[in-house]
Amino acid sequence: MGITEIAGLILLGVAVVIAYFAWRRIRLLREGGVHVALRSQFDDRGRGWHLGVGHYRGDKFAWFRVLSLGSGPNQLISRDGLEIDARREPTGPEAYAMPAGATVLRCRVGSGEIEIAMGPDALTGFLSWLESAPPGRSIPWAS
């Protein structure tokens, strides 16, 4: 097998992986997903953000990382126990890794703290989902 055939096979493999990522992202968005960036390890320089697609599943918000080969969600955030601690605009270095016009929410969840960044329409939907908890539950707003 010559170098040309090996290079062709490598390029074919890369094309298949890229096509899979695109197909997965489009499928998640068509099923009601929204563009969301998430980070769980905080860095003052704006690092640690990962682009993904969020999907509402009852009392859970499933987040799928865009560049993941897995079929399941990379993070499941339960509405029960989720509290928003702060809301802010992204800093300069962060803006490249977020949806356009994003707002960053710092949240406390059962496993610690995370930050979620989403555009205005997705943010409205997320806050509505959070407020629509069944009767008897408190609304998780920080003061």
Image: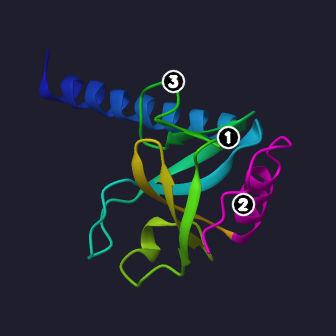
Q: Nearer the viewer, residue 33 or 108?
A: 108
x%, y% of residue 84? Answer: 58, 63
Q: CA distance from mark 3 to mark 2?
A: 23 Å
Identify the residue at horizontal 65%, vertical 43% (top origin).
79
At mark 1, the secondary structure is strand
Q: For mark 2, does the 10 Å Cα neighbourhood hold few (<14), some (14 to 19), or many (20 or more) residues?
A: some
Question: According to the image, what is the colour scheme of the structure?
Answer: rainbow
Which residue is label 2 attached to? 122
Of marks 1 and 3, the one in the foreground: 1
Gap in Å between the C-alphas at discs 1 and 2? 11 Å
Q: Residue furthest right?
A: 135
62 vs 107, left or right, is right
Above or below 8: residue 32 = below
Seen from this angle, which residue lies furthest left?
2
Residue at point 53%, 81% (across, down): 89
| Distance from the alpha carbon under mark 1 to that under mark 3 | 13 Å
Which residue matches tag 1?
55
Residue sitting at 77 percent across and 41 percent down? 32
x and y percent of residue 88 in the render?
Answer: 53, 79
Specify the amino acid type for callout 2: Ala
